Every structure is written in structure tokens, then in C-alpha cells.
């Protein structure tokens, strides 16, 4: 079954940006969507605007509670067909300024939470085969950028996890992949972009042969990797970056 024509999809990071657009896309295509993030009011407003969506507020940095949280979702809404993890902390911090709590928060939300949720998803009764897991990572897990050292490390770790987890999970009928986007025109990004000088803006634009991406560019890649059109693809990271890393 294609994820875009039914099933229950958990979208982590559904309150803003790319995750919100992923959730909206799956919902209008007939999926029941579980909307997860911290901003409860915003999730409720998004859910009300969609045909079949439920808010499920959660803080992904609270790792100890995550597996029970997912078990509760399954108890209330039945087995999941897909898990899409799009939440992240993206702090631009020079290496000299990092402290342990900041580093820990980045790794908890960006790396450890998706790993623990995958572990909970694979439990018998939690998913309906064929199941799929898709992580939204970043090209900064593949190429470097000053001030994104720990963010890049947290995303690259996902790519390593995806490869080995794919080999374990295939026996249960679960595929797992990642999508690595380049710069996408989200509300948050455009606010940051607006603060740049004209020279900085021109240099960012010039780095993308096909221009800066739109949320829908990532949504389509996630949809493909979630559904049966990619039934022979697992353990891979799909780069969606307008040619940035081809240079
Ligand atoms: N935008 C880009 O250019 C770009 C490029 C490459 C990769 N990416 C990746 O794409 C994904 C989405 O990016 P975006 O730009 O759309 O991000 P965004 O607009 O900043 O949204 C981030 C999402 O993560 C959630 N989140 C953050 N911390 C959380 C926590 N502790 N617990 C629960 N939810 C939490 C936020 O919800 P709450 O604040 O409500 O909790 C929000 O829904 C991220 O994984 C990012 O690394 C983005």
C-alpha cells in the first residue's frame, strides 16, 4: 500500500517548516497523521485544518519517556504504517563556544530520539508491515559548514544508523532511509536569510545550481521513500539539494 493513500503516519516535528508540510501532504492524501512536536496549540490548529490528524505533543529531548509515549500512540490509534522524523535542533555555534548541555540537547533531539522511536516502532504490534521509517537529515551530515559542527555530526550519525538498521529491520518488513536536504525556504530559514547582507544572500544563492529548495521538494522525496514505489530501497540517504553537493 502506498503511504499516500492510507495508513497511519507519525510525523515528528510537524508544528513548523518541512515537517508541517509533510504532515499536511500525507493527510490530504488520505493518511491518518499523528502530529508530534512541543507546540501543543499549534499542533491542535494544524490538526483542525486537516481531514484526519491528531495532535500528540511531546518533547523529543526527554528520551526516557519516548518509548512509552509511542506505545500510548499505538494504543490510541492502532499500528503505524510509517514513522517520519523531521524534528531537529539547528544551532549555529562556533566550536569554541560549545558546552555539554547544548551538545547533549542537539544529540538527544537530532540523533537519539529518532533511534529510540525506531526501536519502539519495530516492536510487534506497533507497526503494520510493510512499514517504513524516514529520517530528514541534512547535507551538513555530508559536507562541512562553519558553526554547524555538532549539528553536522548529529546528522551524519543518522546516516550510519540507517545503513545498519536497514539490515536488521528488513527481516520484519520495515525499510529505513534518510533524506538529506540542502537549504529549503522555510519560514525560519527565510527570517534568517532576510537578516543577511546582499553579498551574503548572493553567495548562498550561487551555491545552489538549481536555486534554493521548497518544502515540497523534501515532501516528495519523503513520500517516495515512505511508500511502495520505493519497496526495493532501504538503508540509503537520498540527497535533495539542487546540486549543492554535486560541485
Ligand atoms: N530548512 C532547511 O533548510 C533544512 C536543510 C537541511 C535539513 N533540514 C532538516 O529538516 C528538518 C526540518 O527543518 P525545518 O527547517 O523545517 O525546521 P523548523 O521549521 O525549525 O522545525 C523544527 C521542528 O522540530 C520540532 N522540534 C524541535 N525541537 C523539538 C523537541 N525537543 N521536541 C519536539 N519537537 C521538536 C519543532 O517543533 P516545536 O518547536 O513545536 O517543538 C518543529 O516542528 C530538520 O531535521 C532539519 O535538520 C532543514
Image (cartoon, helix red, strand yellow):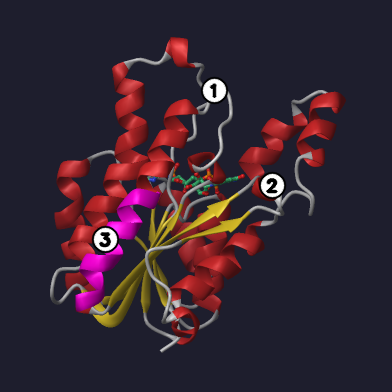
Contact (CB < 8 A) between labels 3 and 1? no
> CB of residue at label 3: within 8 Å of ligand 1?
no
Q: Nearer the viewer, mark 2 or mark 1?
A: 2
**SS type, badge 2:** helix
Residue 14 image label = none
**Is 232 placed above or below 99 here?**
below
Query: SS class of the residue under badge 1?
Result: loop
Q: Is residue 165 magenta?
A: yes
Q: Secondary structure at mark 3?
A: helix
Label number found at residue 165:
3
Q: What residue span does the magenta drawing correspond to?
A: 159-171
Residue 60 in view, yes or no: no
Q: Is residue 201 left or right of residue 89?
A: right
x and y percentages locating residue 157 in the rendered image: 36, 43
Q: What residue sits right under mark 2 in the picture? A: 244
Q: Where is residue 93? Give x, y as percent.
A: 50, 20
Disc number for residue 147: 1
Q: How many discs appear? A: 3
State left or right for residue 45 relative to residue 79: right
Label 3 CA crowd tier, 10 Å (few <14, some 14–19, many 20+): many
Which of the pair 222/20 is nearer the observer? 222
**What is the distance, in whole Å, between disc 3 and disc 2 at their CAs?**
27 Å
Residue shown at 16%/64% (left/top)?
71
Classify mark 1 as within 8 Å of ligand 1 or not, answering yes or no: no
Q: Is ligand 1 closer than 8 angstroms to the Cβ of mark 2?
A: no
Vertical side of 10 occupied by 8: above or below? below
Q: Main secondary structure of the magenta part?
A: helix
Magenta stretch containing residue 49, yes or no? no
Amino acid at each position: 500500500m502506498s503511504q499516500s493513500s492510507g495508513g497511519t503516519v507519525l510525523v515528528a516535528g510537524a508544528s513548523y517548516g518541512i515537517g508541517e508540510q509533510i504532515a499536511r501532504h500525507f493527510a490530504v492524501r488520505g493518511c491518518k497523521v499523528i502530529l508530534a512536536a512541543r507546540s501543543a496549540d499549534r499542533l491542535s490548529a494544524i490538526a483542525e485544518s486537516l481531514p484526519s490528524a491528531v495532535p500528540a505533543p511531546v518533547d523529543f529531548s526527554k528520551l526516557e519517556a519516548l518509548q512509552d509515549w509511542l506505545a500510548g500512540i499505538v494504543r490510541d490509534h492502532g499500528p503505524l504504517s510509517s514513522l517520519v522524523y523531521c524534528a531537529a535542533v539547528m544551532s549555529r555555534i562556533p566550536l569554541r563556544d560549545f558546552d555539554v548541555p547544548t551538545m547533549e540537547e542537539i544529540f538527544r533531539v537530532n540523533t537519539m530520539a529518532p533511534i529510540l522511536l525506531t526501536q519502539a516502532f519495530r516492536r510487534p504490534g506497533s507497526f503494520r508491515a510493510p512499514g517504513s521509517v524516514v529520517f530528514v537529515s541534512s547535507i551538513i551530515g555530508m559536507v562541512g559548514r562553519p558553526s554547524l559542527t555538532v549539528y553536522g555530526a548529529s546528522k551524519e550519525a543518522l546516516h550510519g544508523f540507517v545503513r545498519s538498521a536497514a539490515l536488521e529491520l528488513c527481516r520484519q518488513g520495515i525499510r529505513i532511509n534518510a533524506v538529506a536536504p540542502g537549504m529549503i525556504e522555510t519560514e525560519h530559514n527565510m527570517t534568517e536569510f532576510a537578516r543577511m547582507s546582499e553579498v551574503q544572500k548572493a553567495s548562498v544563492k550561487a551555491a545552489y545550481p538549481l536555486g534554493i529548495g521548497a518544502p515540497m521538494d523534501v515532501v516528495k522525496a519523503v513520500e517516495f521513500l515512505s511508500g511502495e514505489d520505493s519497496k526495493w530501497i532501504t538503508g540509503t540517504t537520498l540527497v535533495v539539494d539542487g546540486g549543492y553537493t554535486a560541485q
